[in-house]
Amino acid sequence: MKKFEFIMEDIKKQIKSGKLVEGDRLPSIATSATLYACSKGTVQRAYQQLIAEHFLYVKNQSGFFVAKPFHLSGAPETVYNLTTGNTLINEFPLKEAQTSLVQALDNYQYQSLDLSYKGIPSLIKTLQKHLTNKKLFVHEDEIFINEGIHQAFVDIVSSFLKKDKYVLIENPTYSYTNQFLKEKKIPTKWINRTDEGISMTELEAFFKTGDIQFFYLVPRANNPLGTNLNKKTICQIARLAEKYQVIIIENDYFLEGQPAPLQETILENARENCIYLSSFSKIMPILRIGYMIVPRNLILGMNQVKQRIYMEGQYPPAMISQAFLEIILKNNLLARYNHTLSTDIKEKKELIHQVSAPWQKQYVQVIDSHSGYYSLICFHPNLSITHLIKELEAKDILITDTKNSFFSPNHPLSHSIRMSFAKIEIKDITFVLETIYETAVNLIKRC
């Protein structure tokens, strides 16, 4: 890290922790040069960059001051909202992003409105290069742009599931996935996933029956568990998929939010038995754009599906959104934001572990999150989670139960709530967690 970057990170850290607040005056350039043991030019560069990123502002002949902050956790709220995992762009390099949007409008103002059902070819080409930089080596014709992961999953299952075949899912998983499978009466089986992972013996028993066509799972940052499958497990799943000819639908929704080095993917280990799904929506919620990578033997079938649903009125993301994403990828803006986001998540994850470590686990237990994005809190069976939700709401803390995340409630972690600290400032985490713990323990003791 260069010296000016170190100075920037140090000042950002002081702002996030509350040590520096809006309106505070920073030391002069000369004072900071002495403090950081560097030249005045280095400090000047750091300050100017912080102004460009809206952390500081300057008053003529008065100095540099802390600006009204752009919080990673989103716009200020009157409550502590732990129910949503959607961040706002806030610390995304907004000035450069605005330039990218203007560039996208300029580049595509004369393009035909007749979008390719696969997505803009130039975006697909750019995305292929972006994935190569992440050590995911794919061909352009294997990539299909869509509006998001859930829609891709629905299209795959609705179009390709054969008669007398099943979809296997991990339990728990996304509530929308469960809702779709149940409402559409899709033949479904489930395998329990805990903080220790998935039983390979049980998984192979499912595959051996020959009636599993698709296995849908989220190897890293499982929602709601927040846990990752380790490399050994991922390789074992890939091997079993190839052995029994099961197609893995790998949901890697948080690829862009993961720090380097990236974890192993099933795609890398079972190319012809994996449909890979990812999205930019978590890191850039203003863009509802995802993509899928399909095995070569499914390209023709997926092209036919895309053509059919296009004719039925299900279009790919708007051209301007695709063009905007293309310019952002070309300008490498994601790399800068990824560092900010992953640092924020890492700090929150460490603090959650630190605060919850002394808790009496017979009452309340936090399932340690690997990703730091989602976490699960499990409770003593005597606790009414409905009452807990109401008690905490009265204290301006919003939580949600995990009932809809479990396809089957027969699971050791089902009596729980899911937490996301995406919209919570790090300075508030200790208060929020301790309030949840104290409220839960008091309710349990009153039972």
Image (cartoon, rainbow, N blue to C red):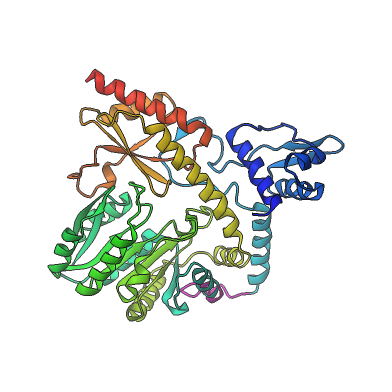
Residue at horizontal 37 percent and vertical 42 percent from the top: 375
Where residue 234 sits: x, y (%)?
Answer: 31, 63
Q: Position of residue 144 (x, y in %)?
A: 43, 72
Question: 297 left or right of 64?
Answer: left
Provide the major secondary structure of the magenta segment: loop
413 displayed left or right of 18 = left
The residue stretch that appears in magenta = 111-124
| Quarter of the view holding residue 182 | bottom left
Residue 251 to residue 173: above or below: below
Screen quadrant of the C terminus: top left
Among all residues in the image, which is located at the extreme left?
Answer: 209
| Above or below for 130 versus 357 | below
Residue drawn at point x = 32 percent, y = 76 percent: 272
In front: 187, or 214? 214
Where residue 199 sits in the image (x, y, percent)? 20, 56
- Residue at left offset 56%, top offset 53%: 339
Question: From this viewpoint, is residue 254 visible?
Answer: yes
Residue 127 versus residue 306: which sits nearer the camera?
Answer: 127
